[in-house]
Amino acid sequence: MNNDELIEDGLEEMENILKKAEVGRIALSNGAMPYIVPVNFLYHEGKIVFHCAWEGKKSDIMKKNPNCCFEVDEFMGEVSYHRETQCRLDYDSVLAFGRAHIEDDQEKKIRLLQLFAEKYSELYRRPLFEGGKRFGKDRVSECCCVVIDVEELTGRRGRTVEDRLKKTMWHHRF
C-alpha cells in the first residue's frame, strides 16, 4: 500500500521548486513560542534571501535565535477524491533548514537585492540600454537583507496516479 519513493539527493528538483516559488514562509522560534510569516524571497547558490524592515518581530527573534526553517509549496490541478471525499491536491513542497543572518557586506547586499528585484520585476531583468534598472547603492540602507545559509533541504511531491497518491521525497545536506 505504501507508494512512497525516497530519493536521497533530489537537489536539482528542490532547487527548481525554490527558484519557481514566489512566496515562502520563514519559521522562527522565540523561546517556547513558534513564529511563522510569509515573505517574498530569492533562492540563490544554496541561500535563501529576503528583505524586511530593520526593526520588527522577525529581526528581534533572529538576533536571539538564528536557527530557522523555510517552507515553500505549490498546489496544482483540481481537487480529487480520496476515500469518496474531495480532499486531495497534487503538490510540491520543500523545507530548508539553516541559520539566518543579516548581510552586512554592502556589495553582496546590493548584488542580492538586484537579483531579488530581477526575480519579481521585468524592469530589473532588462539591459540598461533597453530601459532596465539596477538596484542602486543609494537605496541599500532602506531595508535589511536577510540571508539563510541552507544546511539541509527536504522535499515532497504528491501526484494522483490511478486514484492513489504517489509521494516522492527528497533529502539533501549541504
Image (cartoon, rainbow, N blue to C red):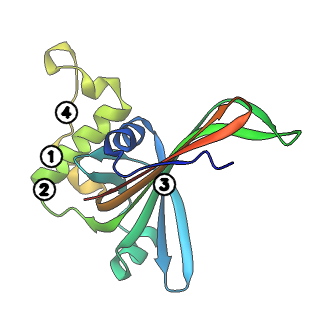
Amino acid of disc 3: Glu
Q: CA distance from mark 1 to mark 2?
A: 8 Å
**Residue at the bottom extreme?**
31
Query: Measured from the top left, where is residue 143 in percent x and y?
Result: 31, 56
Secondary structure beneath dot 4 equals: loop
Secondary structure beneath dot 3 equals: strand
Residue 137's disc is: 1
Quadrant housing residue 60: bottom left
Q: Nearer the viewer, mark 2 or mark 3?
A: 3
Q: Do the numbered discs 1 and 2 sit on residues whose CB atoms are within 8 Å?
A: yes
Q: CA distance from mark 2 to mark 4?
A: 15 Å
Query: Measured from the top left, where is residue 120 in percent x and y?
Result: 38, 33
Residue for badge 3: 71
Q: CA distance from mark 1 to mark 4?
A: 9 Å
Residue for badge 2: 106
Q: CA distance from mark 3 to mark 4?
A: 29 Å
Query: Measured from the top left, where is residue 73 in percent x and y?
Result: 53, 45
- Residue count near mark 3 (Cα–Cα under 10 Å), binned few <14, some 14–19, many ≥20: many
Secondary structure beneath dot 1 equals: helix
Amino acid of disc 2: Gln
Q: Is residue 154 above or below residue 90?
A: below
Residue at (33%, 34%) from the top-left corner? 119
Residue for badge 4: 134
Quadrant housing residue 34: bottom right
Q: CA distance from mark 1 to mark 3?
A: 30 Å
Q: Nearer the viewer, mark 3 or mark 4?
A: 3
Amino acid of disc 1: Lys
State the residue in front, 131 or 59. 59
